[in-house]
Amino acid sequence: MTPEPFGARLRRAMDTRGPLCVGIDPHASLLTAWGLNDDIAGLERFTLTVVEALADRVAVLKPQSAFFERFGSRGIAVLEKAVEESRAAGALVLMDAKRGDIGSTMGAYAATYLDEGSPLFSDALTVSPYLGFGSLRPALDAAVLSGSGVFVLGLTSNPEGAEVQRATAADGRSLAQLMLDHVAAENEGVTPLGSVGAVIGATLGDAGVNLAVNGPLLAPGIGAQGATPADLPGVFGAAVGNVLPSVSRGVLRHGPDASGLREAADRLTDEVRAAVPAS
């Protein structure tokens, strides 16, 4: 049986649960703020609290792989459990690993996150295209087979990104626009939404690129980085209906009580719905 594509599943989740992605970022300062030790026990308590509080209500949970990898194999075991329990509760899981490599190595990354037989199988994966968009082909192909998605770095919210992403390609387009045009080509003709998304920082102001890629636009930067839901129409223009705003500390700082996490997520979802017209 052909799996339902990620884009269709994401569109439904955004329409029913609201367009919000919450990051699971268990860095040391947040563990401390929650009164937890910066160890495996603290990592697991933090992570599963977030999953239990939010996986039944937000559209997407986005674990940041690096914060689990720093604990070695035991941290990866916690990540595997978080992925499994999040998906079981109905949330889509976007693995924030920003993988980017070539050939068989990219294929191995794809097998890790986009193969249904993997313990880290996720609904989508963030990838870096700056070894050339064609280097992503193993991940793009694997995603089609498993009904998963990929989010390609386009214009990121960190200021250093501009020296690469705003650079000019041989044909005069910015590299970011070149990558977005590749994304659009992957999604051409797909309804209701393509499964290849792009990452566009919500803090950019007018992005200055064509965002009509027929795919989801992950928008980090809401909350601690300074952007608000009200900023989204100005950044994304006509494509704002496909935006998936991403927030981490803006929700996570309201822990460790599950009720505080839920209230923060619900409030942000309502603010995004008020700022962004229904698709």
Image (tube, rainbow, N blue to C red):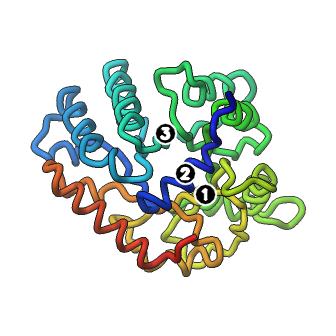
Residue 154 in sight: yes
Q: Position of residue 193 (x, y in %)?
A: 66, 56
Q: Nearer the viewer, mark 3 or mark 1?
A: 1
- Identified by mark 1, the residue type is Pro
Residue drawn at the location 40% of the way across and 46% of the way down? 61
* Direction front: furthest residue: 1
Residue drawn at the location 22% of the way across and 55% of the way down? 261
Residue 101 in sight: no
**Residue at numbered disc 3:** 95
Left or right: 39 as drawn, with respect to 62: left
- Look at the numbered disc 1 and give the secondary structure of its residue: loop
Residue 216: numbered disc:
1
Residue drawn at the location 67% of the way across and 59% of the way down? 165
- Look at the numbered disc 2 and give the secondary structure of its residue: helix
- Identified by mark 3, the residue type is Met
Residue 10: numbered disc:
2
Please say if the residues under marks 2 and 1 sit with CB atoms less than 8 Å apart: yes
User: For mark 2, does the 10 Å Cα neighbourhood hold few (<14), some (14 to 19), or many (20 or more) residues?
Assistant: many
- Identified by mark 2, the residue type is Leu
Q: Nearer the viewer, mark 2 or mark 1?
A: 2
